Image: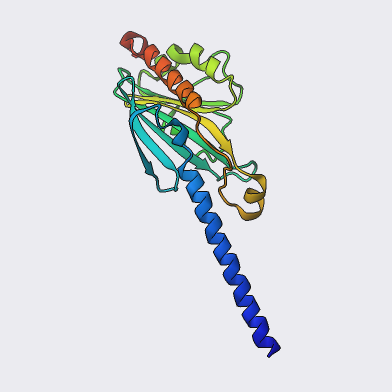
Amino acid sequence: MPLMLAALLLVASVSILVFFGRHEARVAAAARHRILDPSLNVLEAAKVEIDACDFPKMEGKFRGRSFRVALVPDTLTFRRLPQLWLDVTLKRSLPVDGSVAILVRQSGADYFSLTDHLNERLAPPENFPDVCLIKGDGPGARHILDRIAPYVASLLRDPHFKEIAITPRGIRIMRQLAEGKRGDHLILRQIVFEGARLNPEELEDVIAAVLEIETLLLNVKLVSAA
């Protein structure tokens, strides 16, 4: 009889843990899905979807230009807490004959970085951070970098910026949005970004930076190797 009672208590305890675990998972998922909600009105006709990592992404227009806003969870490194990166991409054809990606504070596990797909390593311009990886492709890569360097150097004084990438298909800026909780990461290895939210002002600031880079690139003579 005692063994039967112990077994029943064990089953009951496991059932309760499973119930609360599923409840917490649903609560966490609902919170993740709302991260972009404060900024939905920044883009015109914004369309929101949940991606394969269970984070929201949205697409819409800003001053007639097409933008994609996504969230990229980074949990691959064991030497620091998980990071949640904000990915703001201007989707348009640019008059450039090359690509450039500028990655700061690389960890070796930056799976999202465009630098992995570019072949030529470029020397950092003056006033760039010491820990900085710049790679490019195409005959105009160096010209692109030289044209945007003074402005990008000013952006990178903000340690929240992670990567700035330019290709003939658009411009992308990645910036830290949130950092994971220490307990959940070290003990449970869960992706929890408690309180993460994208404020309208923060999104507008990143969009403004993207548009400033776009303006610098619209002079073909300055970004071509010719």
Colour scheme in the image? rainbow
Check the image and report above or below for 57 versus 169: below
172 sits left or right of 184 in the view: left
Q: Quadrant of the C terminus?
A: top left
The image quarter in which residue 3 lies = bottom right
Q: Quadrant of the N terminus?
A: bottom right
- Comparing 210 with 106, the one in front is 210
Q: Position of residue 12 (x, y in %)?
A: 61, 74
Residue 115 visible: no
- Comparing 78 with 11, the one in front is 11
Q: Position of residue 128 (x, y in %)?
A: 56, 18
Q: Position of residue 180 (x, y in %)?
A: 60, 42
Check the image and report above or below for 21 versus 223: below
- Name the residue at 47% across, 33% down: 38
Residue 38 visible: yes
Q: Position of residue 125 (x, y in %)?
A: 53, 15
Check the image and report above or below for 108 versus 191: above
- Name the residue at 29% across, 23% down: 93
In the displayed image of the protein, which residue is found farthest to the right?
2
Check the image and report above or below for 27 versus 74: below
- Comparing 119 with 98, the one in front is 98
